[in-house]
Image (cartoon, rainbow, N blue to C red):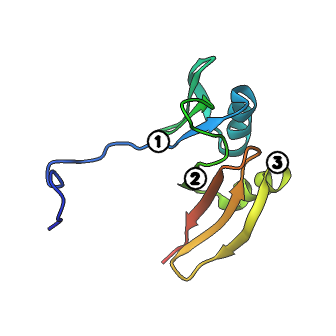
Amino acid sequence: MTDYVGAALTMLIEIAPAFAVRNLDAMCAFYGKLLGLEATYKTPVYAVLRNGPVQMHLYPERDGKVAGQGSAYVFVHAVDDVYATAQAIAKIIHQISDQAYGLRDFLMEDPEGNRIGVAQRLPA
């Protein structure tokens, strides 16, 4: 039982991080290379990137939103491969390692300062 109104009626279907960025085209290319995200919708002021059911939304800095303040945590099947790519194109904050909480993960920062945790579940 939860304490907030509507909890029993609300079922989340998807969630997508949305980051303000300074260079929309460069960040679309960065996340394409890092996570295989492809732009399925793109205008000069908004981009929706997808890889299967996973989405990320990017938009130019506006309305008081400043680039480099976003964060997200993503789960992948081949974290070591993503880590190898990240080492070449991103700033690594925490090196890849196996965690006691059952994940192999690392933390990185994209070229604009947004932080992304990338993880793979360890076999039980």
Instruction: Check the image and report above or below for 42 versus 19.
Output: above
Q: Secondary structure at mark 1?
A: loop
> Going by the picture, which residue comes out furthest to the right?
88
Question: Nearer the N terminus, badge 2 or badge 3?
Answer: 2
Quarter of the image where the N terminus is located: bottom left
Question: Which residue is pictured at 57% across the width and 24% down the height?
Answer: 46
Pick the residue in front: 7 or 118: 7
> Going by the picture, which residue comes out furthest to the top?
43
* Whole-percent x, y for residue 3 in the image: 17, 65
Q: Nearer the viewer, mark 2 or mark 1?
A: 2
Pick the residue in front: 42 or 37: 42
Asked if the residue under mark 3 is in contact with the one under mark 1, i.e. CB atoms within 8 Å, the reply is: no
> What residue does disc 1 label?
16
* Whole-percent x, y for residue 120 in the image: 57, 64
Q: Amino acid at mark 3?
A: Ile
Instruction: Check the image and report above or below for 14 versus 50.
Output: below
User: Within the image, what quadrant is residue 122 found in?
Assistant: bottom right
Q: Amino acid at mark 2?
A: Ser
Work out how far the residue at label 2 is from the one at label 3, CA to CA, in angstroms.
17 Å
Question: Nearer the N terminus, badge 2 or badge 1?
Answer: 1
> What residue does disc 2 label?
71
Q: Give residue 72's mark.
A: none
Is 4 positioned to the left or the right of 107 in the image?
Answer: left
Q: Give residue 89's mark.
A: 3
* Whole-percent x, y for residue 77 in the image: 58, 56
